[in-house]
Amino acid sequence: MKTTSTLSLFLFSTLLFSQYGNRFDWLIGTWHSTMDGSPFTEIWLKKENTYYGKAFILNNTDTVFSETLRIEKIDNHWVFIASINHSAPTLFTLIENDTNTLIFENKEHDFPNKVVYENKGHKNMIAWIEGKVKGETKKEEYLYTKVK
């Protein structure tokens, strides 16, 4: 009986993680967009239960913007971690997750307070950041196409 209970708990935990954790798998791949007329690329991969991302803007062959990204589970919460141009990381906690939309929030951060990824089909994604700047709501939106 004890073996059956342990096995059932293990199978339930594995199933729960695979259903919830794999909801981010649609991010995996290389995504292209533009930012201020320059090509903007975001690349995501998964290793074990952590998602690793890299975002960058190239101007000819020079990298003018670089961001290291990660989505991982910390203390039973999914967290989006961003570090721009090798700065200290900023953490955003997942507050909403359905099949197609991920919303991460950090109310303590100046801008952005929210980071959102929305799956718009097999090859398209919209991402945006939003928050308050000088008391005014600001939103920056990026339309991505998956290239591989």
Image: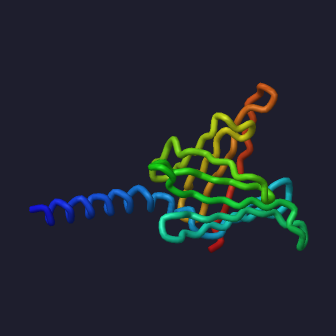
Q: Is 114 placed above or below 67 here?
A: above
Give the quadrant of the N terminus: bottom left
- The answer to which quarter of the image holds residue 18 is bottom left
Residue depicted at x 72% and y 39%: 139
Q: Is residue 11 left or right of residue 122?
A: left
Extreme residue toward the top, this view: 135
Point out residue 102 in the picture as x, y percentages from the top left corner: 54, 49
**Residue 55 x/y as whole percent:** 73, 62
* For residue 14, above or below residue 136: below
Horizontal side, residue 28 vs residue 18: left or right: right
Q: Front-most of 38 and 52?
A: 52
User: Residue at (55%, 55%) from the top-left corner?
Assistant: 119
Total number of numbered discs in the rendering: 0
- Residue 144, image x and y in percent? 67, 59
Q: Residue furthest left?
A: 1
> Residue at 27% across / 59% down in the picture?
12
**Which quadrant holds the C terminus?**
bottom right
Left or right of 8? Residue 26 is right
Asked whether 33 or 13 is in front, the reply is 13
Between 111 and 2, the one lying in front of the other is 2
Residue 43 occupies quadrant: bottom right
